[in-house]
Amino acid sequence: MTSVSFASKWIALVATVAVVSLFCGTLWAESVEPNHVVELNMSVTTASAYQDSMRYVRSNDAIGLLTSMRKLARQDPHPLVIGRLVRGCANVAEGPDAHERVDALLQDADQNEDDPLRQLIAGVAVHYRGHHTGKRVDSKKADYRRALHYLGRTQGRFRHAARYWLYTAVSHYRLGSQAQAEEAIAMAVKTDIGSDADVFYSQAEIFHRTEPKRALKHLKQYRQLMKDNHARGGFSAPEKDARVGEMIARVEQAVAGKLVPANERIFDPVKTSHGFPTWLALILAALAGIGVGLGAARWRSSSR
């Protein structure tokens, strides 16, 4: 094998791994749920259905997960059930048909305005659509406004669940409403049952510009709780953990004086037209350019 051929294959492998890592990192973007449901005042019936839903998580069946959790949430809107329900919403809001699937959920919510659960599902799904697929800041903000609209129609039914407050807080923050974001995230902290690492992660996002020391503490708390949840049987998210490591390094710089400006979106990057963060698209483009150059060099060499 020539060195040029080896280099070309290595570049292709790196590009493939980068794409797969990106997909897996967003697919499991949520903090993992623990496996100690008995400790969290969940009924035997709910616990059984909750554990059974893991088959949809393991098979990456977003529709199956959302459907099963929607049914269970009607019977028992336990915070852990809501937590797994929103995982289904997050996964539905990814992929090439994310816009159509989320639009269908929005339409369903509009046709059933008196159904708080449908409003919650629509609000969370459109929040994630903005986060996962937004290609411009204005399109992201449009979806975050929609998220607040639908979350506001839940008639107070899910105020007991930290996840309701979490999406309310982060949507407000990403729309530039710091005070409202801080009020909502305080409610997320108050209602958290102690297992949701994203409560720490979201606090870090909301405070990483105004209180970087606090944000740094929350990122480290997020990492620790993720490890604890994994030790109790929950899923790990190594790709997100790697991103959190990069965030910690950047926030440490902020603590040292190099603050994070508004256009540096380390928690909610703008995607390219292919759905990749801009930084990854630039890396892949550079690798592709190197590959083309090496391929041309190989062709010239073989044609002599």
Image (tube, grey):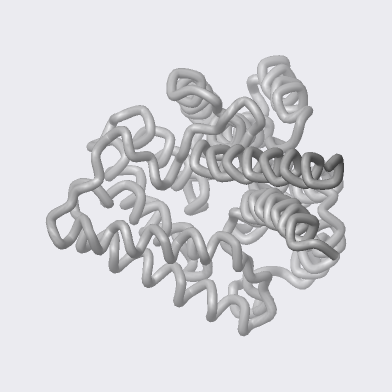
Residue 28: quadrant of the picture: bottom right
Tell me, yes or no, if residue 245 can be seen here.
Answer: yes
Residue 159: give x, y in percent of width and height: 47, 45
Q: Is residue 97 above or below residue 248?
A: above
Task: Residue lying at the far left in this picture: please name it.
Answer: 257
Q: Nearer the viewer, residue 46 or 56?
A: 56
Residue 29: give x, y in percent of width and height: 60, 54
Q: Is residue 55 above or below residue 289?
A: below
Count the marks: how many?
A: 0
Quadrant for the N terminus in the image = bottom right
Residue 106: give x, y in percent of width and height: 67, 22
Q: Nearer the viewer, residue 182 or 240?
A: 240
Which residue occupies 38% across, 58% down?
Answer: 247
Which residue occupies 51% across, 20% down?
Answer: 139
Residue 218: give x, y in percent of width and height: 34, 64
Residue 63: quadrant of the picture: top right
Task: Residue lying at the far bottom in this picture: please name it.
Answer: 231
Which residue occupies 65% across, 36% down?
Answer: 121
Quadrant for the C terminus in the image = top right
Which residue occupies 33% across, 63% down?
Answer: 249
129 lies left or right of 111? left
Q: Nearer the viewer, residue 181 or 128?
A: 128
Q: Is residue 282 above or below residue 245?
A: above
Task: Residue lying at the far front in this picture: please name it.
Answer: 304
Tell me, yes or no, if residue 154 can be seen here.
Answer: no
